[in-house]
Amino acid sequence: MTKAFAIAGLLMCVNFAAAGTLSYPETMKGEVVDSYFGAEVADPYRWLEDDSSDETGAWVAAQNKLTFGELEKIQYRDEISARLTDNINFERVSSPFKEGAYTYFYKNDGLQNHQVVYRQKGNDEPEVFLDPNTFSDDGTTSLAQLTFSDDGKIAAYSISEGGSDWRKIIIIDAHTGKQLEEELVDVKFSSISWFKNEGFYYSSYDKPKGSELSAKTDQHKLYYHKLGSKQSDDKLIFGGTEQEKHRYISGYVTEDNRYLVILGQNSTSGNDLRFKDLSRNDSEIITVVDNFDSDSYILDNIGSKLFIVTNLNAPNKKLVTVNAAKPSPSNWKDLVAETDNVVSFTTGGGFLFAEYMIDAASKIMQYDYVGKLVREIELPGVGSASSISGRRSEHELYYGFSNYITPNTLFSFSTKTGKSTIYRKSGAKFDSENYVSEQVFYSSKDGTKVPMIITHKKGLKRDSANPTMLYGYGGFNISLTPRFSITNKVWLDAGGVLAVANLRGGGEYGKAWHDDGRLMNKQNVFDDFIAAGEYLVEQKITSPDYLAIRGGSNGGLLVGAVMTQRPELFKVAIAQVGVLDMLRYHTFTAGAGWAYDYGTSEQSEEMFEYLKGYSPLHNIKSGISYPATLITTADHDDRVVPAHSFKFAAELQAKHTGDAPTLIRIDTNAGHGAGMSISKVVELYADIYSFTLHNMGIKKPFN
């Protein structure tokens, strides 16, 4: 349906803002026009989609020179950086886990770019097992996954270079650390799931033609790698034919090595479900669910009895059982029924754990394998608990608990007695007694009640002059639960208020809440966010002169849409790695998989018009004074390609009127955010906080 007309030549266009403001770098304008259902849409900055061109490289360098030159002028930027560094500088240790004869854990001494994997045997002194800080000189290569064979003697781990979603898998002798064979390459969106001590399953795409960062990938494949063999000899298990074609395929082995479970998806929601009996060499792949109308997966099994988590006819999810010999949904029997609250399930110690989300906070129930409630697990307060899980043989499990003003505390949990004991307190330099965090409910445009948690230092004056950062996401069934982040402390100590809104499109209230914020309901998300800002102003917590909005990825779309719809409501907009071109997002990498939430410009004229109606790139208008805007992206982001941010920045710089700067910060050797080094985290937040406070007119943020 989309037709691109040839570029008739690139026209040089120098963008100048109004007198007294910044002069932005030259941005070439082309004559690319796309046709959608007879409507022509110009795309003058299409050339910026070519991430490997010299012209794009020169544009990036010029934009970064301007942006970092402006940021360096902010007098307290270095102080914010120093405070972030000081706050982050504390020891952080993960829950322990056992593999073979060793107990492993992750630890960061404080300012290490990446956490280090340690191990110990019995009461021996811990030793370094794997140190990702040695993977690269500049900290841009990170550890993505680490898994072990059943006996713990062999480890396979994946690395990300420059923040890319493309991975390499390295296989080592867990005792000596010696690499056993050539690394596996071109692995993407994959787990590493072992079968006994013989090999593992992983997923990947064929190498795309064109740019590895932006070329479309839409046929995922599941492979089995037998130890000692070459990757070229790996067995294709699923995804190699048009009949098996899926955008995402994942495979994992049940704890008893009995079944291989295969999940296939064409979007971020909805999957078909299959399994293969690995106890028989001649077994076929059995289909359990053959459509994408629900989300279902096999949680566990006892022999041929399968335990399946599903939202089929249960929007808030439930747990069912079925015999593997007759696994179709018509034979499913409820084990833990659906309730009014959305739930997720884990296993450990021979028990099932149901974590319910109630107004975005955790409540955990323990069940046995016949569905009998054993107990509610007593949590230390209202907040977020990490999943309780472990092997069937382990009766001491671990979980973490935190909220916006409670640093993460690790607890050990006895599956037999139900007693939780503090395993490790946080070393964060944070006194919870000095801060307040409360949940409020406000009304959106259509009257829907939306929860929001507001956090600040005690003694806040409601004088409408508090610098306030409003954060949101609102999509893909993802829930923003109250969790502690030490980077927030610098904002709070600068007199700032942090407000996190649980918008529709998320998963806080189950599938209905998600559905109310996707496709032709997407505007509800933006209305919810705007209403959150209006509530903060009405309550005199802040005012438009002191209100900033921030979001990343789908949240970057949120910021872009809202700042173009209500520019006068916000002083500052921080759009991080955002999906900003809603007419073309699906043409890059695996972006078409987001169509469940967004729809595409090609599916119907009605959907095209709806997307064009809120697409941030296409709703920037000449003569409008937009908020001070900092757009952040990274040159190796192959999930939301940087072209989104490039084109949005170019369009904004060309049309924006007013004194507020519109800058783009392009990180190098970084990706969508996963695996970011501590040094890059400090740099990013120092820039975000200093840019925000400076453009609110704050002279001295710290007393």
Image (cartoon, grey):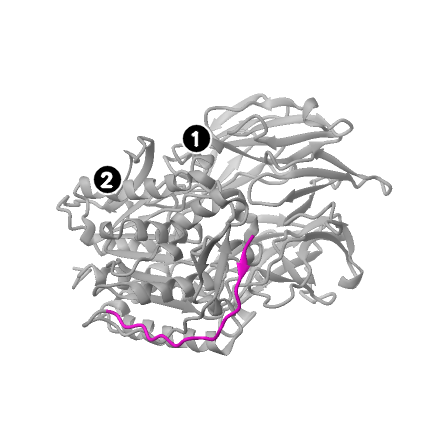
**Earlier residue among tags 2 and 1:** 1
Q: Residue at x 66, y 35 (%)?
A: 300
Q: Residue at x 61, y 23 (%)?
A: 335
Q: Residues within 10 Å of mark 2 (few under 14, many from 20)?
A: some
Vertical relation: 427 (above or below) 31? above
Q: Residues within 10 Å of mark 1 (few under 14, many from 20)?
A: few
Residue 23 in percent (x, y) is at: 27, 74
Residue 509 in percent (x, y) is at: 43, 32
Q: Nearer the viewer, mark 2 or mark 1?
A: 2
In the picture of the structure, the residue carrying the numbered disc 1 is 378
32 relative position to 394: left or right: left
Residue furthest front as drawn: 38
Which segment did they paint magenta?
1-17
> The residue under label 1 is which amino acid type?
Glu
In the rendered structure, does residue 608 fall within the stretch colored magenta? no
Vertical relation: 88 (above or below) 71? above
Residue 388 in percent (x, y) is at: 53, 38
> The residue under label 2 is which amino acid type?
Tyr
Q: CA distance from mark 2 to mark 1?
A: 34 Å
Quadrant for the C terminus in the image: bottom left
In the picture of the structure, the residue carrying the numbered disc 2 is 535
Q: Is residue 518 visible?
A: no
* Of the pair 289 and 191, the residue shown nearer to us: 289
Q: Residue at x 30, y 64 (%)?
A: 655
